[in-house]
Image: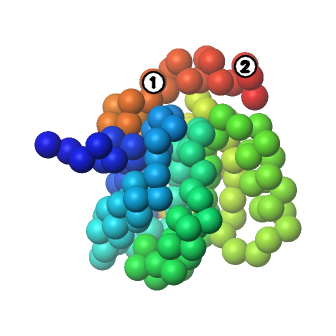
Amino acid sequence: MLAPESRLYFSDTVAELSIVMWSQRGDITDAAFLAYLDAHAADVRGVTQVAILNFSYTFVPTAKGRAAMKAREAELGLSNIKAVALVSSSFLVRGAVQALSWAMPGPKTKAYSPGNHGEALAWLSRFAKFDLLKAHECIGRGAAHVGLDLDSIKTGQNAAG
């Protein structure tokens, strides 16, 4: 039986691409985020990830979660990252990510609204090697795992932001 927090997130890799998805449930605690860090560290062990596709429509880690992630950068394989695409339903988050990408050194970052993950994958393919069909299949598995309906999110959220 899966622990309750296991349905809050999904993490998997397709060649050099890591795909991370978060549930839209509002009960993602620091403990759940720390459990995700453990799972992600295990997923990327022995894998060279070069790009990350993060679906985070409503979730943002707390300061404690961000500090824990920063402390585990090497273990999480973040040093090789060349590009990060964030899929978010928040217009403000997408704008902030885009603005920071222009001002900050480090991995290239780009934000997308829900339903535009195909564009995100196309952009990430400029930086990382991965099979596009397998990436789409992985996104489908992740959406099913965390309970996201990508079609209804595309229709409902794109109109709002």
* Residue drawn at 56 percent across, 67 percent down: 64
Q: Quadrant of residue 70?
A: bottom right
Percent x, y of residue 37? 40, 65
Q: Which residue, given by chain and number where applicable, does mark 1 sit on?
A: 149
Percent x, y of residue 13? 36, 57
Query: For the residue marked with disc 2, what is the amino acid?
Result: Ala
Asked if residue 37 shows in the view, the reply is yes
Percent x, y of residue 1? 14, 43
Give the position of the C terminus as an image quadrant: top right
Residue 126 marker = none
Q: Is residue 159 shown above or below 31?
A: above
Q: Is residue 155 left or right of residue 128?
A: right
Q: Is residue 99 left or right of residue 25?
A: right
Q: Which residue, given by chain and number where applicable, does mark 2 sit on?
A: 159
Nearer-the-camera pick, 36 or 120: 36
Q: Secondary structure at mark 2?
A: helix
* Residue drawn at 32 percent across, 37 percent down: 145
Q: CA distance from mark 1 to mark 2?
A: 16 Å
Residue found at the far left of this picture: 1
Q: Quadrant of residue 94?
A: top right
Percent x, y of residue 88? 64, 40
* Residue drawn at 29 percent across, 43 percent down: 4
Query: For the residue marked with disc 1, what is the amino acid?
Result: Asp
Q: Is residue 106 left or right of residue 23?
A: right
